Amino acid sequence: MLLKKLFTDFCSMSLHESFLLLGSNLGNRESFLQEARVQIEKKAGKILKASDLYETAAWGIETQPSFMNQVLVIETPLSPETLMATLLVIEAEMGRIRGEKMGPRTIDIDILFYDELVYDSVNLTIPHPLIHLRRFVLLPLSEINPLKNHPGLKKNIAELLTECKDPLNAEKLNSLTNNR
């Protein structure tokens, strides 16, 4: 318990770079992503970069609407656990109901990376354990930083994208201003 508190206190003393994945497949998906960006800036940290929006068929449970996704890079003073707790609050405030695993949702916010940390707890695994299996994650990540190193797999995003066997294509929908 003391070790966890020391870790949390250490992480909160400085700013950290975190990569987040936003996703929505219910209602006005673009509006949900926009509201999530607003809430993340209010509660979690400054958005440094935002990828374009991508659309892909649902991954996992395929009998649901397509997802719209976006990757953000934020600068946060929050520890990994506090950041995750904050993102879960944002999801709940935006109407996210946790029902069926991988089921439809108004908003989903995942932590992909947090600095170069490799971290595993009951509530959180960083890097996200499925990054390398999902084209809809790798494409917007490669747009933002193709040379970003995956600290667990010891490969960069461009390499992981080349090796990805996910058959689902992620279609770029628009161009946003990446440097906010």
Image (cartoon, grey):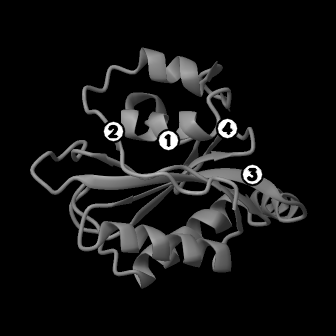
* Amino acid bearing label 4: Val
Confirm or deny contact between disc 4 and disc 3 (CB under 8 A). no
Kindly report the distance in space between the C-alpha atoms of the residues bearing marks 4 and 1.
21 Å
Q: Secondary structure at mark 2?
A: loop
Q: Residue at x 32, y 67 (%)?
A: 29
Q: Nearer the viewer, mark 4 or mark 1?
A: 1
Q: Secondary structure at mark 4?
A: loop
Q: Position of residue 48 (x, y in %)?
A: 71, 57
Residue beneath disc 2: 170
* Amino acid bearing label 2: Ala
Q: Residue at x 37, y 67 (%)?
A: 30
Q: Position of residue 138 (x, y in %)?
A: 47, 34
Kindly report the distance in space between the C-alpha atoms of the residues bearing marks 3 and 1.
17 Å
Confirm or deny contact between disc 3 and disc 2 (CB under 8 A). no
Residue beneath disc 4: 118
129 in relation to 147, above or below? below
* Pointer 3 or 2: first along the chain: 3
Q: Residue at x 49, y 50 (%)?
A: 52
Circle 3 packing at 10 Å, graded few (<14), some (14-19), many (20+), is some
Circle 4 packing at 10 Å, graded few (<14), some (14-19), many (20+), is some
Kindly report the distance in space between the C-alpha atoms of the residues bearing marks 3 and 2.
25 Å
Residue beneath disc 3: 17
Q: Is residue 33 left or right of residue 158?
A: left
Quadrant of the frame with the N terminus: bottom right
Q: Secondary structure at mark 1?
A: helix
* Pointer 2 or 1: first along the chain: 1
Judge whether residue 3 can be spotted in this image: no
82 in relation to 123, above or below? below
* Pointer 4 or 1: first along the chain: 4
Residue beneath disc 1: 140
Q: Nearer the viewer, mark 4 or mark 3?
A: 3
